[in-house]
């Protein structure tokens, strides 16, 4: 099994702890939206969308920061 396919031994999972945390939070948020969306009010849906956009921005920043730091090594 290649390192990219192994969830236990992948160096990516260790090097990108911040990115992994943000992605985990985003996944949890999406699952919550999917589960609750039929009963959510318009305000809750709007807030959920804003939070999803914020999390996507955080993922983007973490990736960009990682790329910048890799070039400095």
Image: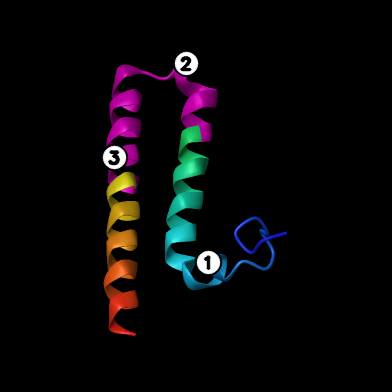
- C-alpha distance separating marks 3 and 1: 24 Å
Residue 31 coordinates in the image, percent (x, y): 53, 33
Q: Earlier in the sequence, mark 1 or mark 2?
A: 1
Q: Residues within 10 Å of mark 2 (few under 14, many from 20)?
A: few
Task: Point out the stretch of residues depicted in magenta.
Answer: 31-55
The correct choice, above or below, for 69 with respect to 16 in the image is below
Residue 23 sits inside the magenta stretch: no
Residue 4 coordinates in the image, percent (x, y): 60, 59
The correct choice, above or below, for 44 with respect to 51 in the image is above
Look at the image and tell me in which quarter the C terminus lies: bottom left
Majority SS type along the magenta span: helix
- C-alpha distance separating marks 1 and 2: 38 Å
Look at the image and tell me in which quarter the N terminus lies: bottom right
Q: Which residue is mark 3?
A: 53
Residue 59 coordinates in the image, percent (x, y): 35, 53
In the image, what residue occupies the spot 46% across and 20% down? 37
Q: Which residue is mark 2?
A: 39
Query: Where residue 40 is drawn, which disc sits there?
Result: none
């Amino acid at each position: 099994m290649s390192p990219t396919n192994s969830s236990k031994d992948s160096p990516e999972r260790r090097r990108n702890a911040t990115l992994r945390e943000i992605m985990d939070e985003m996944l949890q948020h999406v699952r919550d939206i999917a589960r609750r969306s039929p009963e959510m009010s318009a305000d809750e849906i709007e807030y959920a969308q804003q939070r999803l956009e914020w999390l996507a921005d955080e993922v983007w920043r973490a990736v960009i920061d990682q790329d910048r730091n890799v070039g400095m090594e």
